Image: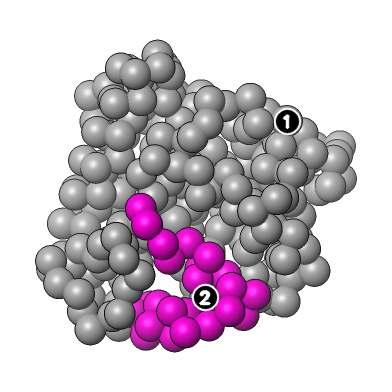
């Protein structure tokens, strides 16, 4: 573990690992412990997790963790406006790589709803997620090289609302700079409520993005809004 030459805000920790497999194992263990603690304290637990290719090893490690998954609610932090069977669907990714083995009984809150507009689906997801016990037990974010996290993209029309501590919605429609343009994203108040907050990134370019984000405004680099205690950063080269 090292500071990796980053001037992080007080209380923000960074953990360095030699490879993605080690990163995935340790992160899965930390999230598992947070979910177990939530179940013991409240009878239920909640997990918000990023999609994409990078989290697959972590999701598969987590799926084997021995805990009472029947009491766990899982949600992606964002979603492309595609059905679960589409290869770009985060819901599909979670069903394939997390809701398997020990984690098969977990409840999944997905965002895509056939027959609804993205705006209506975001409103429905907000209602479902607002019913979760707050604070959320565990959050695992990723980060793009443009500084976006979840689908909170620089330049998205509703970004300022999604990052506002006073945002009343748990989920909003966002726009990515490249296709597919329409996304749904959880908003800052829900994401930042998590007891355990993790940012999992890989490679030197992501580390440089993080360094730049520390000096940026959240509207230019949205991940900056999350770089505060109790965030823990999990990085491997």
Picture coordinates of residue 227, whole percent (x, y):
43, 66
- To which quarter of the image does residue 116 belong? top right
Q: Classify residue 90 as left or right of residue 184.
A: left
- Camera sees residue 236: yes
| Pointer 1 residue | 127
Tell me the tag on residue 13.
Answer: none
At x 42% / y 25%, what residue is drawn? 45
Picture coordinates of residue 201, whole percent (x, y):
35, 67
Counting residues from the start of the chain, the first of labels 2 and 1 encountered is: 1
Q: How many marks?
A: 2
Q: Nearer the viewer, residue 87 or 213?
A: 213
- Camera sees residue 108: no
* The stretch drawn in magenta includes residue 80: no
- Which quadrant is home to the N terminus? bottom left
Q: Are marks 2 and 1 in contact (CB under 8 Å)?
A: no
- Which quadrant is home to the C terminus? bottom left
Q: Nearer the viewer, residue 38 or 236?
A: 38
* The stretch drawn in magenta includes residue 225: yes
* Residue range (magenta): 206-230
């Amino acid at each position: 573990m090292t500071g990796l030459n980053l001037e992080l805000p007080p209380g923000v920790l960074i953990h360095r690992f030699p490879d993605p497999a080690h990163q995935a194992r340790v992160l899965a263990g930390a999230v598992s412990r947070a979910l177990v603690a939530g179940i013991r304290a409240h009878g239920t637990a909640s997990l918000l997790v990023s999609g994409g290719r990078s989290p697959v090893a972590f999701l598969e490690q987590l799926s084997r963790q021995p805990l009472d998954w029947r009491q766990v609610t899982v949600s992606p932090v964002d979603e492309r406006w595609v059905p679960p069977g589409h290869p770009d669907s985060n819901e599909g990714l979670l069903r394939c790589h997390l809701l398997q083995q020990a984690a098969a009984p977990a409840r999944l809150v997905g965002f895509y709803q056939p027959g609804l507009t993205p705006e209506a689906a975001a409103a429905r997801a907000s209602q479902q997620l607002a019913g979760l016990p707050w604070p959320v037990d565990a959050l695992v974010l990723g980060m793009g090289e443009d500084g976006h996290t979840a689908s909170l993209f620089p330049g998205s029309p509703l970004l300022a609302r999604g990052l506002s501590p006073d945002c009343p919605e748990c989920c909003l429609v966002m726009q990515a700079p490249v296709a597919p343009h329409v996304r749904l994203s959880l908003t800052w108040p829900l994401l930042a409520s998590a007891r355990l907050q993790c940012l999992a990134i890989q490679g030197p370019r992501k580390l440089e993005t993080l360094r730049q984000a520390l000096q940026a405004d959240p509207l230019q680099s949205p991940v900056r809004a999350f770089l505060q205690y109790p965030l823990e950063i999990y990085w491997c080269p």
